[in-house]
Amino acid sequence: MLSMPRAHIDAPMDGPRDRNIFGAFALMISDDIVRASSSRAPEAGPAASALALLAHQPGLSIRMLAVGVGLSHAGTVRLVDRLATEGLIERREHSSDGRTRALYLTPTGKIASDEVLASRDEVIAEGLSILKPDELKILCDMAERVLRDRLENLEHSYRICRLCCYEGCTNCPIDAELHERGVERGKSGDG
């Protein structure tokens, strides 16, 4: 094992270095999440996010799903067509807009979504397993503050939570922040 000179270990970290370390950490975890969740999805790309997001927020419109998964409207229509053909999602009448279709997971789609989210959870648990419980709590508290501060609007909330396990997030910081701003997901006529 290589050892670092003591002066280097005790040297204070500078801002750019800290940001680089955090950026590399965030990208590493993000890449691992995307790789693991995509490996459990029926196809590469945004299918995993679509399945997870529809489990999180059943009844989304294609427009809001497009925002969440980061595709154009046309690209999302094609994705929905493929997932519907595979029996993973279904289109239903929208509760407030007769021109819009609401998207829901089928029972098979729920199983696929559960597999996607389980692989995501496994990667996160493994990636953070080096942390002690009190360190993990501190990291989560800081992450919650950043999430709430950086949240832009309702549409951004779908993008942020596109691979979240809603059942596991009983006190969602994004929902709490939206609520404080007087916005509720699924109640805006868009979802």
Image (cartoon, rainbow, N blue to C red):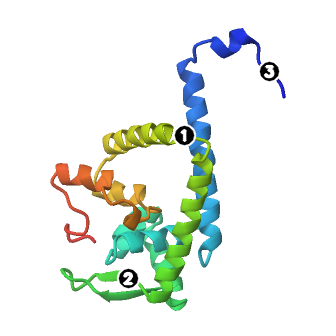
Q: Which of the two discs, 2 and 1, sits closer to the camera? A: 1
**Mark count:** 3
Relative to 167, say whether 23 is above or below. Answer: above
Seen from the viewer's position, the closer of residues 178 and 131 is 131
Is 14 on the left-hand or right-hand side of 6?
Answer: left
Circle on res. 104: 2
Q: Give x and y (percent) for residue 36.
A: 63, 63
Residue under label 1:
132
Q: Which mark is residue 22?
A: none
Residue pushed farthest top? 7
Q: Residue furthest right?
A: 1
Locate residue 71, reporting x and y percent: 48, 65
Q: Secondary structure at mark 3?
A: loop
Q: CA distance from mark 1 to mark 3?
A: 23 Å
**Tag 1's secondary structure?**
loop
Image coords of residue 154 (percent x, y): 28, 57
Depth order, front residue of 78/36? 36
Query: Which residue corresponds to the image point at 32% horizontal and 58% vertical from the top-left?
Result: 155
In primary-sequence order, the first of circles 2 and 1 is 2
Which residue lies under the disc numbered 3? 3
- Secondary structure beneath dot 2 equals strand
Q: Position of residue 170 (x, y in %)?
A: 32, 60
Image point (47%, 62%), residue name:
163
Can you tell which of label 3 and label 2 is closer to the viewer? 3
